[in-house]
Image (cartoon, helix red, strand yellow):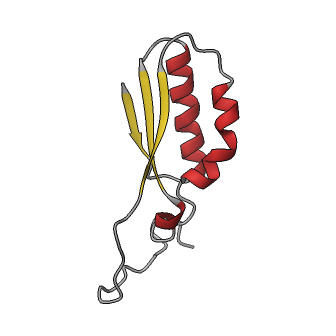
């Protein structure tokens, strides 16, 4: 079994799902799981991080890949609560090239 926890942008999520789909379909792994945030949690994370809302339209594509045996799944995580009493961590521009 292979588990990937998504911390990259939506393109990285697609690459992860495509890779997991190929590995399951070819019988290299028995199961592939991608862990992504919900759309509600997305608002508190890095801009454009992969999330379930943006992957859902592609479920039909991944289901159409011939596979004799195996499991491919996406696990969605959600936060428990938010609080106005806790200071927010500001979103920065880390990773962007400076001129």
Nearer to me, 68 or 29: 68
Q: How many marks?
A: 0
> Residue 9 falls in which quadrant of the image?
bottom right
> Residue 89 falls in which quadrant of the image?
bottom left
Note whether 33 is above or below 50 in the view shown: above
Find residue 93 and report its horizontal and vertical position in percent: 49, 72
For the C terminus, the quadrant is bottom right
Note whether 89 is above or below 30 in the view shown: below
Q: Looking at the image, which residue sits at the far front?
A: 80
Find residue 50 and report its horizontal and vertical position in percent: 54, 53
For the N terminus, the quadrant is top left
Q: Residue at x 50, y 19 (%)?
A: 24
Q: Residue at x 44, y 52 (%)?
A: 7
Find residue 2 and report its horizontal and vertical position in percent: 38, 28
Q: Residue at x 46, y 75 (%)?
A: 92
Nearer to me, 52 or 50: 52
Note whether 21 is above or below 81 in the view shown: above
Residue 46 seen in the current view: no
Q: For this view, does 94 lie left or right of residue 54? A: left
Q: Residue at x 55, y 35 (%)?
A: 17
Q: Looking at the image, which residue sits at the far left?
A: 86
């Amino acid at each position: 079994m292979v588990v990937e926890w998504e911390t990259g942008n939506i393109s990285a999520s697609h690459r992860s799902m495509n890779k997991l789909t190929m590995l399951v379909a070819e019988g290299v792994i028995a199961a592939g799981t991608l862990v992504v945030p919900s759309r509600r949690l997305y608002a508190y994370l890095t801009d454009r991080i992969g999330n379930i809302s943006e992957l859902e339209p592609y479920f039909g594509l991944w289901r159409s890949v011939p596979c004799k045996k195996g499991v491919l799944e996406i696990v969605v995580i959600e936060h428990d609560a938010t609080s106005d009493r806790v200071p927010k961590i500001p979103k920065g521009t880390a990773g962007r090239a400076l001129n």
